[in-house]
Amino acid sequence: MSPESDPSPPEPQKGAPAPPKKSFGNMGPDHWTKSRGDRNDEAFEYYRERGHAPGVAEGGGPRNFYCMDCDGVIPSDPPAEHCPHCGVAIRGEVRRYFNWVEIDTPPTSDWLALRPYFLGALLIFLLLGWLVWWLI
């Protein structure tokens, strides 16, 4: 069997660092978020900071979103017009959730952008129809 077709994993070379252990279940010291060392500090700091935002410690509601200005938690029910933490008016068309932003306003119609293609296709269809009628 040639070395290229050998399916067994290569043996670690002497002096090379051992590959990380696979981590399943609870977040132990070998979990990927912990084993990356200092490379996750920025993300950890962001989530630590988010844990102290207004309304986060209290838990918020089952469906809530974040204020775009103060990062405070705003419950969806009942609908609020102003942030209860900083008083900024809430824009109804854009809401920031935990890891995504939702835009409620549907996009404007694509008719204006597609109109030249429809008119071009109609013109070609009419020219072909006229050509067939003229040839018959």
Image (spheres, rainbow, N blue to C red):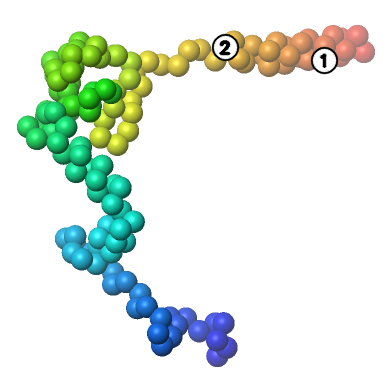
Give SS at disc 2: helix
Q: Residues within 10 Å of mark 2 (few under 14, many from 20)?
A: few
Residue at the image position 37 percent from the left and 15 percent from the top: 105
Q: Which mark is residue 128?
A: 1
In the rendered image, residue 63, in percent from the top left (x then y), is placed at 17, 28
First of labels 2, 1 by sequence position: 2
Quarter of the image for residue 132 reads: top right
Q: Amino acid at mark 1?
A: Leu
135 left or right, relative to 76: right
Quarter of the image for residue 97 reads: top left
The furthest residue to the left: 58
In the rendered image, residue 71, in percent from the top left (x then y), is placed at 22, 28
The furthest residue to the right: 135
Which one is nearer the viewer's eye here, 114 or 27?
27
The furthest residue to the bottom: 1
Give SS at disc 1: helix
Which one is nearer the viewer's eye here, 24 or 115?
24
Q: Which residue is mark 2?
A: 111
Image quarter in which the C terminus is found: top right
Residue at the image position 76 percent from the left and 11 percent from the top: 123
In the rendered image, residue 84, in percent from the top left (x then y), is placed at 14, 17
- Residue 44 against residue 106 in the figure, above or below: below
Q: Residues within 10 Å of mark 1 (few under 14, many from 20)?
A: few
Residue at the image position 31 percent from the left and 61 percent from the top: 36
Residue 8 can be seen, yes or no: no
32 left or right, relative to 126: left
In the rendered image, residue 111, in percent from the top left (x then y), is placed at 57, 12
